[in-house]
Image: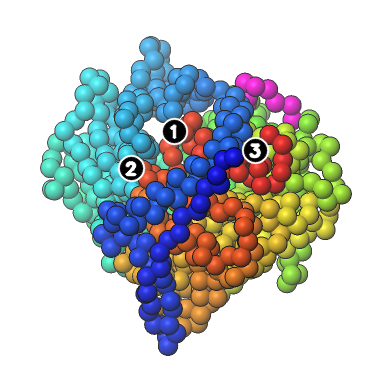
Amino acid sequence: MTETPTPPVAATRPHSFTRHGITIEDPWAWLRDPGYPEVTDKDVLAYLKAENAYFDAIMAPHKPLSETLFQEMRGRIKEDEASVPQKDGDWLYWTDHEVGAEYARWWRKPVAGGEDQLILDETPLAAGKEYFRLGEISVSPDGRLLAYAYDDNGSERFEVRVKDLATGELLPDTISGMLSEIVWTADSKGFLYGLANENWRTDNARWHKLGEPVEQDVELFREADEGYRVAVGETQSRKWLTIATGDHTTSEVWLLPADNPAATPICVAPRKPGREYDVDEHDGTLFIHTNDTDTNWRLVTAPVTAPGEWTERIAPARHFYMTGVTCFADFFIVEGREDGLDQIELHRYDPAIPPVRLTFPEASYVAGLGDNPEYAIDKLRLGYESMVTPGTVYDYTVATGALETLKVQEIPSGYDGSKYRTERLTITARDGTAVPVSIVYPQDFPRDGTGKLYLYAYGAYGHAIPPGFSTSRMSFLDRGMAFAIAHIRGGDDLGQHWYHEGKLEKRTNSFHDFVDVAKGLIALGYTAPGRIAIAGRSAGGELMGAVVNSNPELWGAVIADVPFVDVLNTMLDESLPLTPGEWPEWGNPIEDKAAFELIRSYSPYDNVTAQAYPPMLISGGLNDPRVTYWEPAKWAARLRATKTDDNILLLKTNMGAGHGGKSGRWESLREYADEMAFVLWQLGVEG
């Protein structure tokens, strides 16, 4: 008989601290290497490696299932996938993959005709590296140079290189530690970017002139508030460079002429606490998208010469949440969501001409602008999908309203959408709030409580989870399971007010919504307690931690990827990269006792209790700058020492990756296959 592997046990070491008169015991605090971001402590590494070995041993019998799932998912991906070419100036640009390749190739060819040109191949750049991610790629306005940035360890500190597209040679210009976009100046002689400081915060905007030492780069802007982050960009017309700064609640935008970055920056509107805005420009007029009067946002205009003189162009609407505005030469596009569903409106600059709203056929879907790099266009590139409709690329002819299908996501192993059904449900939470749920299931899915269900949510930062298509998800559906997305408060699925109802002092609404959605699906006959697998990553992993503490009996399996679970300790440590910028989202427990007590009341790590917990798979990344590796490690250690059940608990730490897990098409898919195998195993679903 094979001996059952023994789970590792993390030692406890006395450690405590006192805040607001309350003493917190934290016997696993030692798992944070004091030398972070370097992790060299032998005890820390030994524990993480022991957990990884335990993961491998426990999952070994299920490797055949994991391999089956991987092959299924790979079989649904077109290996030589190519994007639809898009015109930008004198060139058509697109990407593709070679059969078997993990990473993409970037191509172009002259609009006037000529040979295809390979401008960047990610595969050689990633060769020999455990992790690789292309973070930014930008061609100069004259088409001669390519600037790109990559991260090869998951730390999200990118290196910038510049390539001469005529010769294929790399210029000597090299910038390390970049954390921003790359935005070229109009003369193609330099670009704007931002550096990460020692605390992984972008507090600057810099101008690099090609051929000059990086040490001589001009600092165009520096942010003094440690909670703000700086970003560089440009208007759709490319006449103006933008420098934006802000946190989760406040923003401020500065403009620079793209042909004269040395000019005095123009501040569109000085920062005002609680006011957010973003800016585009058309023919000397600024189009400012702002929440200054309403959480559903509005559109105002102002002359570039007098940017503070705002005139309302589109008033806020009760049911329409305006999410963005893009100005083109002859019209502008307003994107938003009406009662949670994506909408696209085309507006002429003459306000007397009524706007045109594009219509889509399904009751629940995802739709939005695709790649539209040019300013003067007569066709709009759009993207569309739903939980049963594969990703579709359209061109919309502005003059006629005709919609041309350019590409439908190809699924080589085959796909029959008629085998599945999708619905958009509403479930009432405990405080009477109606919470939307998107669900997809096989057409013969039972409604007698015997069904197995995978429930996903995020619920933070105003980030909506769209009801889109997933080829990976089909491996659950084809085994008879249902897949649901709970559009809980904390996201902005139903508008910015929906986000505000799940943050700060209202944070627990997100947790309650998720539990109540699960109970509602049980009441409707979709599933039963113990037949639900749940998943979330990052702040969604915090959600997982909260609901396994509050309602462990509901869940049959739990996936918590890079989970933000040590909330109290992290929010008390202003030396960590993200902490000061996170206080508007979670509260500042250093200065505010009420925030301290609230976070302490729900922080998953601090609320582990002696009770039975469901089977759990937890992941982390050693180089993760967003959710540091010790958060999932400490949580797993406390769970092992405290829980009263014999259910499987696994911790897997990617030793050479960061927040996003493994890179590459296939390696990331293998990681997901392991998670799926864990879920199917624990729910008793046959492989």
Range of the magenta residues?
Answer: 407-417
Query: With 610 as the anchor, is 155 left or right in this view?
Result: left
Q: Where is residue 139 in the image (x, y as percent from the top left)?
A: 33, 32
Residue at position x 26%, y 39% in the image:
160
Q: Give the residue pinned by disc 2.
A: 153
What is the crowding at mark 2: few (fewer than 14 residues within 10 Å), some, or many (at least 20)? many
- Element type at marker 3? loop
Q: Give the residue pinned by disc 1.
A: 664
Q: Please tell me in which quadrant of the rendered image residue 552 appears.
A: bottom right
Q: Where is residue 661 in the image (x, y as percent from the top left)?
A: 45, 44
Residue at position x 49%, y 30% in the image:
666
Q: Give the residue pinned by disc 3.
A: 473
Q: Where is residue 136 in the image (x, y as percent from the top left)?
A: 36, 39
If you read the primary sequence from the N terminus, does the residue marked by circle 3 or circle 2 appear first? 2
Residue at position x 40%, y 64% in the image:
11
Is residue 408 covered in magenta?
A: yes
Quadrant including the N terminus? top right
Looking at the rendered structure, the kind of residue marked 1 is Gly
If you read the primary sequence from the N terminus, does the residue marked by circle 1 or circle 2 appear first? 2
Q: Which of 233 and 178 is in front in this view?
A: 178
